Amino acid sequence: MLLQVLHIAQAALAAYGGQQSFHAIQNLLKYEEATQKLAKYSNEADRQLQKTRATQAAGAIALIMSLVASVLLAFRGHSYGFLVRTLASPFMAGCLFLARQYVQDYWGGGKRVPLPKMGSYNDAQKQTEDLAQVLERLMFSWCATSVLCLLAGY
């Protein structure tokens, strides 16, 4: 029962992170056309555009994976084998760790300075920082469910 509640909480946190990710991507898309034009003339601008897209995608994919896994384990976990139930949590913790690290490495983990007259971009930057925090909290929650699975023998 406790494990089921934790998985439901993980699903809710992943949904919240998905909202942050969605808004960040929407704000970044406002600058997409201008950035693509600039990328035609600058290799660095092209690299930054590709990295921005890749980090946003990595965060979104990790959230979707966490949401799906937590919902499946919360409502159908008893029907999966012992091995799946035992390995799902550490696997998800590892995936979330890698995604969070990838996002933070590019976005600076709160160390980027807001740009003048770039309100939506600055909003996207803040939402991406929030996304990284959600990924971290999810990672720790999957670590907790890993421990609970091992101790309780689920």
Image (cartoon, grey):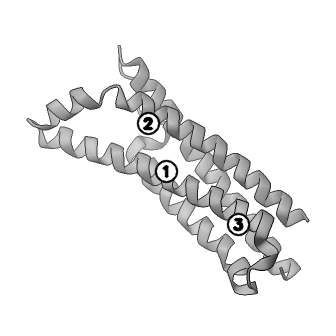
Q: Earlier in the sequence, mark 1 or mark 2?
A: 2
Q: Residues within 10 Å of mark 3 (few under 14, many from 20)?
A: some
Return the mark for residue 59: 1
Q: Earlier in the sequence, mark 3 or mark 1?
A: 1
Q: Relative to residue 103, is residue 84 drawn left or right?
A: right
Give the Cα separation between the discs numbered 1 and 2. Answer: 11 Å
Residue depicted at x 27% and y 41%: 49
- The residue singled out by tag 2 in the image is 25
Q: Earlier in the sequence, mark 3 or mark 2?
A: 2
The residue under label 1 is which amino acid type? Gly
Give the Cα separation between the discs numbered 3 and 1. Answer: 18 Å
Question: Under tag 1, what secondary structure?
Answer: helix
In this view, 41 is above or below 53: above
Residue depicted at x 65% and y 41%: 16
Where residue 126 sits: x, y (%)?
Answer: 51, 31
Please name whichever residue, 37 or 122, is drawn nearer the observer in this view of the structure. Answer: 37
Q: Relative to residue 46, is residue 20 drawn left or right?
A: right
In this view, 121 is above or below 22: above
The residue under label 2 is which amino acid type? Ile
Return the mark for residue 41: none
Where residue 30 sits: x, y (%)?
Answer: 35, 25
In this view, the mark in front (3 or 2): 2
- Tell me if label 3 and label 1 are in contact, CB under 8 Å: no
Q: Quadrant of the C terminus?
A: bottom right
Question: Under tag 2, what secondary structure?
Answer: helix
In this view, 114 is above or below 128: above
Where residue 5 sits: x, y (%)?
Answer: 85, 58
The residue under label 3 is which amino acid type? Cys
Question: Under tag 3, what secondary structure?
Answer: helix
Give the Cα separation between the discs numbered 3 and 2. Answer: 28 Å
Return the mark for residue 143: 3
